[in-house]
Image (cartoon, helix red, strand yellow):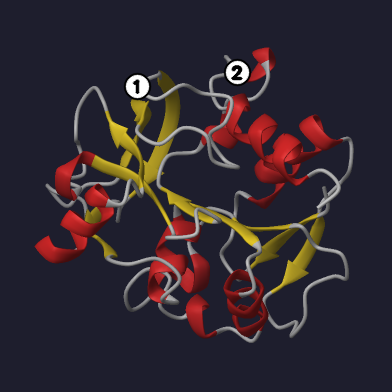
Amino acid sequence: MNAAIIVFPGTNRERDMALALTRVTGRKPAMVFHRETALPAGTDLVVLPGGFSHGDYLRCGAMAALSPIMAAVREFAMGGGHVLGVCNGFQILCEAGLLPGVLLRNAGLRFLSMDCVLRVERAGTAFTSHWQKGATFRAPMAHGDGNYFADEATLDRLEGEGLVAFRYADANRNGAARDIAGILSPNLRVLGLMPHPEDLVDPLMGGVDGLPLFTSMAEALVGV
């Protein structure tokens, strides 16, 4: 699996993501700066990692969504490529129109930095095949704008089509609609989620709760 990690000014989780991907693939992912206009040849997976792209000015992810590289990411996704966006990456995917809804300021307007428990709502995808539906796992979260919002019709569609990937299972601290922590695109090839599974992929990190996400991707995309 050949992965490309997109790096924006203010991105700060690209190395965490690279460590997680390298652990399951044995290959270092390519780092692609936001001013580039093309993805590396043979890319199987594009990852938009966490951070504070462009300082989180305007709405989080809004400026990054207009970066030159995003035209290539959008084309890759529209062509059936797999894309993962975590935290700020989730925000960017929504702002770029690759996922519906928007991420707003947390309820209470406070930055949240703590572990949470997620429940798997959709198993059997390229991102979740190593979990069973209903499984729970721990994941760190660190965000000020994780309050997922969409209109009722969109939320009903996500629910009805099985596109809610993860929900907060212990407490909904950021106010996200229907406890949604992560969603999938209709073709199940684009995933956005707020917490950081890449920070729990090794016992030295305090656990391996996030490892199934990366193992699922590595197995699904090998040889793609």
Point 29% across, 35% down: residue: 167
Numbered disc in front, either 2 or 1: 1
Q: Which is more toward the observer, 49 or 114?
A: 49
Q: Which is more toward the observer, 214 or 12?
A: 214
The answer to whether any part of residue 149 appears in the image is no
Total number of numbered discs in the rendering:
2
Secondary structure of the residue carrying tag 2 is loop
Disc 1 crowd, CA 10 A, few/some/many (<14, 14-19, 20+):
some
Residue 44 coordinates in the image, percent (x, y): 76, 57
The answer to whether any part of residue 107 appears in the image is yes
Check if mark 2's residue and mark 1's residue have beta carbons within 8 Å.
Answer: no
Secondary structure of the residue carrying tag 1 is loop
Name the amino acid type tagged 1.
Gly
Where does label 2 land, which residue? 208
Q: CA distance from mark 2 to mark 1?
A: 18 Å
Residue 142, disc: none
Residue 204: quarter of image: top right
Q: Is residue 56 above or below residue 207?
A: below
Name the amino acid type tagged 2.
Val
Q: Is residue 105 left or right of residue 121?
A: left
Residue 134, disc: 1
Disc 2 crowd, CA 10 A, few/some/many (<14, 14-19, 20+):
some
* Of the image marks 2 and 1, the number of the one nearer the N terminus: 1
